[in-house]
Amino acid sequence: MYIIFLGAPEAGKGTQAANVAHQLNLVHSATGDMFRQAVEQGTELGMQVKSYMEKGVLVPDELTIHMVLERMSAPDCQPGVILDGFPRNIKQAEALDEALARQAKAIDVVVYIKVSEEEILRRLSGRWICRQCQTPYHSQNSPPRVWGKCDQCGGELYQRPDDTVEIIKKRLQVYFAQTAPLISYYTQAGKLLEVDGEGGVDEVGRRVILALRGVVTR
Ligand code: AP5
Ligand code: MG
Ligand code: ZN
């Protein structure tokens, strides 16, 4: 089972992808989380990607595609993967389709979480994420049980340096120019499921599960 979560910055991809991965017992592969972990650990990859992330632009395709395909080739990804934040442009989508086709596999479905720009800006300032496991929280919408600490692993919560009003403008520009064309790409492939991403975390979660029901049991 290969499921992609597609949507604008702050749409709730990470929140919903983690839930679906947990329910289906599949690996949740989030490119943004992997890059942030590499930056935190000061690895060579981290040093290569830091400046792109700080500016809110995409990391070069070669680095991104290589990292994702390598992760997907690991044994724990053989039953399938929940992809969050990848693919992010047509070139990445084609590379993914080709890599899966070489193993006689294919993307099953793409969950497109749709939110308005006003909602994106409302969510922006309240997001806190775990330094260790990257779980996202929101000071009002989904606060941790203990302020400043991750419910899952006890890690420290921090605010992403790209979650500023200035950088989100760039991230949105990049999203509309490079990522939004994937909506037609996957619609044409008959794989797109659109889900209204506004409403509480649980409410959107129920919509996602309902939308996936027919596909997952197929
Ligand atoms: P990435 O980390 O993927 O960021 P993004 O796409 O901008 O998406 P976000 O993580 O900001 O939002 P999300 O949809 O996951 O929302 P979340 O669930 O956290 O990418 C960061 C950078 O890495 C890029 O700019 C680029 O440089 C690089 N990169 C990553 N992938 C790449 C690729 N494939 N190619 C090249 N470069 C790449 O929710 C947001 C907030 O809202 C949280 O606070 C959450 O608690 C809250 N919330 C969630 N759902 C709800 C709800 N229903 N109601 C109210 N609040 C909610
Ligand atoms: Mg995310
Ligand atoms: Zn954590």
Image (cartoon, rainbow, N blue to C red):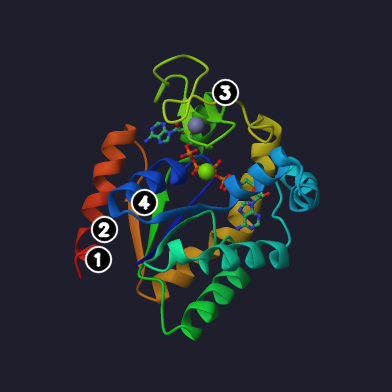
Indicate the amino acid at tag 4. Answer: Ala
Residues at discs 2 and 3 in contact (Cβ within 8 Å): no
Point out residue 140 in the picture as x, y percentages from the top left corner: 42, 19
Q: Which mark is residue 156?
A: 3
Mark 4 or mark 2, which is nearer to you? 4
Chain-order first, disc 4 or disc 1: 4
Residues at discs 1 and 2 in contact (Cβ within 8 Å): yes
| Secondary structure category for the residue under label 1 | helix
| Label 2 sits on residue | 212
Q: Nearer the viewer, residue 71 or 57?
A: 71
| Residue projecting furthest to the top | 147
Callout count = 4
Point out residue 143 in the picture as x, y percentages from the top left corner: 42, 21
Chain-order first, disc 4 or disc 2: 4
Is residue 33 shown above or below 89? above
Residues at discs 4 and 2 in contact (Cβ within 8 Å): no
| Label 1 sits on residue | 215
| Secondary structure category for the residue under label 2 | helix
| Label 4 sits on residue | 21
Chain-order first, disc 1 or disc 3: 3
Point out residue 117 in the picture as x, y percentages from the top left corner: 51, 39
Residue at image position (80%, 47%) is 47
Within-10-Å neighbours for mark 1: few <14, some 14–19, many 20+: few
